[in-house]
Image: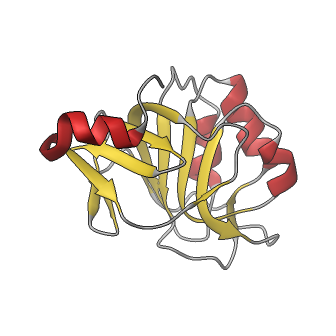
Amino acid sequence: MTLSTADLYDERGDELDSLALQLHDLGGRVAFDGPVRTVRCHRDNALVKAVLATPGDGAVLVVDGGGSLESALVGDLIAASAVDNGWAGIIVYGAIRDRTAIAALPIGVKALGSNPRRSAKDGVGEVDVPVVIAGVAFVPGRHVWADADGILVER
Protein backbone atom coordinates (compact mmCIF):
# COMPACT_ATOMS: atom_id res chain seq x y z
CA MET A 1 0.00 0.00 0.00
CA THR A 2 1.61 3.24 -1.10
CA LEU A 3 -0.90 5.83 0.15
CA SER A 4 -2.20 6.03 3.70
CA THR A 5 -5.95 5.76 4.11
CA ALA A 6 -5.99 9.42 5.25
CA ASP A 7 -4.24 10.56 2.05
CA LEU A 8 -6.40 8.25 -0.06
CA TYR A 9 -9.55 9.71 1.48
CA ASP A 10 -8.27 13.26 0.90
CA GLU A 11 -7.66 12.34 -2.74
CA ARG A 12 -10.85 10.36 -3.50
CA GLY A 13 -13.35 11.40 -0.79
CA ASP A 14 -16.87 10.73 -2.02
CA GLU A 15 -15.78 7.66 -3.97
CA LEU A 16 -15.03 5.87 -0.69
CA ASP A 17 -16.80 4.76 2.47
CA SER A 18 -14.95 4.88 5.77
CA LEU A 19 -15.69 2.23 8.39
CA ALA A 20 -16.26 4.09 11.67
CA LEU A 21 -16.12 0.85 13.67
CA GLN A 22 -12.83 0.59 15.55
CA LEU A 23 -11.07 -2.73 14.91
CA HIS A 24 -7.81 -3.96 16.45
CA ASP A 25 -4.71 -4.47 14.28
CA LEU A 26 -3.79 -8.09 15.08
CA GLY A 27 -1.70 -9.31 12.15
CA GLY A 28 1.95 -8.83 11.33
CA ARG A 29 1.07 -6.14 8.76
CA VAL A 30 -0.93 -3.08 9.70
CA ALA A 31 -1.38 -1.68 6.18
CA PHE A 32 -2.90 -3.83 3.44
CA ASP A 33 -5.31 -3.57 0.54
CA GLY A 34 -6.88 -5.61 -2.22
CA PRO A 35 -10.11 -6.66 -3.86
CA VAL A 36 -12.91 -7.64 -1.48
CA ARG A 37 -14.00 -11.24 -0.96
CA THR A 38 -16.59 -12.01 1.70
CA VAL A 39 -17.90 -14.67 4.05
CA ARG A 40 -21.00 -14.22 6.17
CA CYS A 41 -21.15 -16.69 9.06
CA HIS A 42 -22.11 -16.85 12.72
CA ARG A 43 -19.90 -18.79 15.13
CA ASP A 44 -18.92 -21.20 12.32
CA ASN A 45 -15.60 -20.78 10.53
CA ALA A 46 -15.67 -23.69 8.06
CA LEU A 47 -16.31 -21.38 5.10
CA VAL A 48 -13.61 -18.94 6.27
CA LYS A 49 -11.11 -21.82 6.39
CA ALA A 50 -12.22 -23.12 2.97
CA VAL A 51 -11.99 -19.72 1.25
CA LEU A 52 -8.58 -18.85 2.74
CA ALA A 53 -7.27 -22.24 1.56
CA THR A 54 -7.79 -21.11 -2.05
CA PRO A 55 -5.56 -18.72 -4.04
CA GLY A 56 -6.09 -15.20 -2.69
CA ASP A 57 -4.23 -13.32 -5.41
CA GLY A 58 -3.80 -10.35 -3.06
CA ALA A 59 -7.45 -10.16 -2.00
CA VAL A 60 -8.81 -9.20 1.41
CA LEU A 61 -11.36 -11.48 3.03
CA VAL A 62 -14.07 -9.57 4.92
CA VAL A 63 -15.74 -11.88 7.42
CA ASP A 64 -19.14 -10.80 8.74
CA GLY A 65 -19.46 -12.71 11.97
CA GLY A 66 -22.31 -10.51 13.14
CA GLY A 67 -20.06 -8.85 15.70
CA SER A 68 -20.05 -11.94 17.91
CA LEU A 69 -17.14 -12.34 20.31
CA GLU A 70 -18.43 -15.69 21.57
CA SER A 71 -16.01 -17.79 19.49
CA ALA A 72 -13.11 -17.21 17.13
CA LEU A 73 -13.56 -17.22 13.36
CA VAL A 74 -9.82 -17.13 12.53
CA GLY A 75 -6.93 -18.86 14.30
CA ASP A 76 -3.24 -19.22 13.59
CA LEU A 77 -3.57 -22.21 11.24
CA ILE A 78 -6.23 -20.50 9.13
CA ALA A 79 -4.21 -17.25 9.03
CA ALA A 80 -1.06 -19.19 8.05
CA SER A 81 -3.04 -20.84 5.24
CA ALA A 82 -4.08 -17.36 4.05
CA VAL A 83 -0.41 -16.30 3.96
CA ASP A 84 0.55 -19.45 2.03
CA ASN A 85 -2.24 -18.79 -0.48
CA GLY A 86 -1.41 -15.14 -1.20
CA TRP A 87 -4.12 -13.25 0.70
CA ALA A 88 -3.31 -9.63 1.60
CA GLY A 89 -5.49 -9.48 4.69
CA ILE A 90 -8.49 -10.51 6.73
CA ILE A 91 -11.06 -8.16 8.28
CA VAL A 92 -13.21 -9.89 10.90
CA TYR A 93 -16.41 -8.44 12.31
CA GLY A 94 -16.03 -10.85 15.20
CA ALA A 95 -13.25 -12.56 17.13
CA ILE A 96 -10.00 -14.30 16.30
CA ARG A 97 -7.73 -16.45 18.49
CA ASP A 98 -3.99 -17.19 18.65
CA ARG A 99 -3.20 -13.45 18.69
CA THR A 100 0.52 -13.87 19.38
CA ALA A 101 1.03 -16.34 16.53
CA ILE A 102 -1.04 -14.26 14.10
CA ALA A 103 0.91 -11.11 15.01
CA ALA A 104 4.05 -12.88 13.76
CA LEU A 105 2.55 -13.65 10.32
CA PRO A 106 3.11 -11.38 7.29
CA ILE A 107 -0.58 -10.64 6.77
CA GLY A 108 -2.96 -7.89 7.78
CA VAL A 109 -5.64 -8.92 10.27
CA LYS A 110 -8.20 -6.58 11.81
CA ALA A 111 -10.88 -7.83 14.22
CA LEU A 112 -13.12 -6.77 17.08
CA GLY A 113 -11.09 -8.81 19.55
CA SER A 114 -10.18 -12.33 20.54
CA ASN A 115 -11.60 -15.37 22.28
CA PRO A 116 -9.83 -18.73 22.70
CA ARG A 117 -13.08 -20.65 22.11
CA ARG A 118 -13.28 -22.55 18.81
CA SER A 119 -16.20 -22.02 16.49
CA ALA A 120 -18.45 -24.64 14.92
CA LYS A 121 -17.29 -26.36 11.72
CA ASP A 122 -20.61 -27.01 9.97
CA GLY A 123 -20.10 -24.81 6.91
CA VAL A 124 -23.14 -22.65 7.59
CA GLY A 125 -23.01 -19.25 5.91
CA GLU A 126 -22.53 -17.52 2.56
CA VAL A 127 -19.52 -16.75 0.37
CA ASP A 128 -18.98 -13.74 -1.91
CA VAL A 129 -22.20 -11.94 -1.05
CA PRO A 130 -22.40 -8.23 -0.23
CA VAL A 131 -22.11 -7.67 3.53
CA VAL A 132 -22.84 -4.52 5.49
CA ILE A 133 -20.81 -3.80 8.61
CA ALA A 134 -21.60 -0.68 10.67
CA GLY A 135 -23.41 0.83 7.69
CA VAL A 136 -20.58 0.23 5.19
CA ALA A 137 -21.14 -2.14 2.26
CA PHE A 138 -18.36 -4.56 1.35
CA VAL A 139 -19.13 -5.81 -2.14
CA PRO A 140 -17.04 -8.60 -3.66
CA GLY A 141 -14.67 -7.23 -6.30
CA ARG A 142 -14.55 -3.69 -4.96
CA HIS A 143 -11.28 -2.49 -3.44
CA VAL A 144 -10.60 -2.14 0.30
CA TRP A 145 -7.69 -0.36 2.01
CA ALA A 146 -6.73 -0.73 5.68
CA ASP A 147 -4.04 0.79 7.87
CA ALA A 148 -3.57 2.13 11.40
CA ASP A 149 -6.10 4.93 10.72
CA GLY A 150 -8.90 2.63 9.62
CA ILE A 151 -10.62 0.99 6.67
CA LEU A 152 -11.83 2.48 3.38
CA VAL A 153 -13.82 0.70 0.68
CA GLU A 154 -14.93 1.73 -2.80
CA ARG A 155 -18.58 2.65 -3.09
Q: Is 36 situated above or below 110? A: above
User: Residue 89: x and y, percent?
Assistant: 57, 38
User: Residue 7: x and y, percent?
Assistant: 34, 36
Q: Is 77 situated above or below 88? A: below
Q: Is 74 situated above or below 69? A: above
Q: Is residue 123 left or right of residue 101?
A: left
* Quadrant containing the C terminus in the rendered view: top left
- Render colour scheme: secondary structure
- Residue 45 sits in quarter: bottom right
- Residue 114 sits in quarter: bottom right
For the residue pair 92 and 125, the one nearer the viewer reads as 92
The residue under the point 56% across, 30% down is 88
- Residue 126 sits in quarter: bottom left
User: Residue 116: x and y, percent?
Assistant: 82, 70
Residue at the limit of the structure toward the left, as seen here: 14
Q: Is 148 situated above or below 140? A: below
Q: Is residue 120 visible?
A: no
Q: Is residue 154 left or right of residue 120?
A: left
User: Residue 76: x and y, percent?
Assistant: 80, 47
The residue under the point 43% across, 67% down is 21
Q: Is residue 125 visible?
A: yes
The residue under the point 31% across, 54% down is 18
**Numbered label tally:** 0
